[in-house]
Amino acid sequence: MAPVVELRGALPAGLAMGIPALPLYLLCVVCNLIPVPFIIVFIRRILGWMARRGGKLGKIAAFVERHAHKKLEIYRKYEMLGLFILVAIPLPGTGAWTGALIAGLRDLRLRYALPVIGAGVAAAGIIMLALSHGVAVIF
């Protein structure tokens, strides 16, 4: 799973390969959550290091921060519900990695952010399973 597609790409791909839905769902949710605590805890240090290095790394750090600050408006307006919605909506630029990025940049404590992000990932997985099964039934 990559930061852009996460479980939104892994679930439909796994279903297309004939993997049973429940084990696939559980695997995708768990694997999607593995990097979240590390992102929350270390993102500020990583982006700071990248910015100090300059060049392409500095540009990437600036891009990531700009992207996160755009998504930050959702969080500011709705706080934890906004974080859940941001993670749960299966669209590009949303998801667990973006939610963890925002949680890290907002200095949210891991014990508060992780359950909300986990619930959002679970909801996104259910949405993607429903959409994938619907598409499979249609075709």
Image (tube, rainbow, N blue to C red):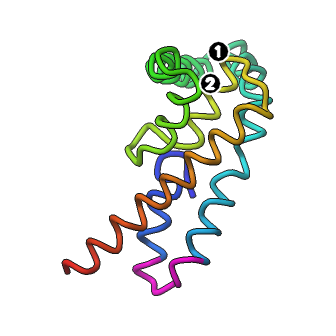
Instruction: Name the amino acid type tagged 1.
Output: Gly
Q: Position of residue 45 (x, y in %)?
A: 78, 21
* Label 2 sits on residue: 57
Label 2, secondary structure: give it: helix
Q: Position of residue 126 (x, y in %)?
A: 47, 61
Q: Residues within 10 Å of mark 2 (few under 14, many from 20)?
A: some
Q: Quadrant of residue 53?
A: top right
State whether residue 12 is above or below residue 123. Answer: below
- Magenta stretch holds residue 80: no
Instruction: Quarter of the image for the N terminus: give it.
Output: bottom right
Q: Quadrant of residue 101?
A: top right
State whether residue 138 is above or below residue 101. Answer: below
Query: What's the distance in space between the residues labelled 1 and 2, CA to CA?
Result: 6 Å
What is the residue that sits farthest to the left in this orientation?
A: 138
* Label 1 sits on residue: 54
Taking the spot 56% from the left edge, 21% from the top edge, the residue there is 79
Instruction: Name the amino acid type tagged 2.
Output: Leu
128 sits to left or right of 97: left
Label 1, secondary structure: give it: loop
Taking the spot 20% from the left edge, 80% from the top edge, the residue there is 139
Taking the spot 51% from the left edge, 40% from the top edge, the residue there is 87
Q: Position of residue 40 (x, y in %)?
A: 73, 31
Q: Which residues are magenta?
A: 15-22
76 sits to left or right of 52: left
Q: Residues within 10 Å of mark 1 (few under 14, many from 20)?
A: few
Frontmost residue, 99 versus 43: 99
Q: How many labels were placed on the picture?
A: 2
Taking the spot 72% from the left edge, 22% from the top edge, the residue there is 108
Query: Is mark 1 in CB contact (under 8 Å) with mark 2?
Result: yes
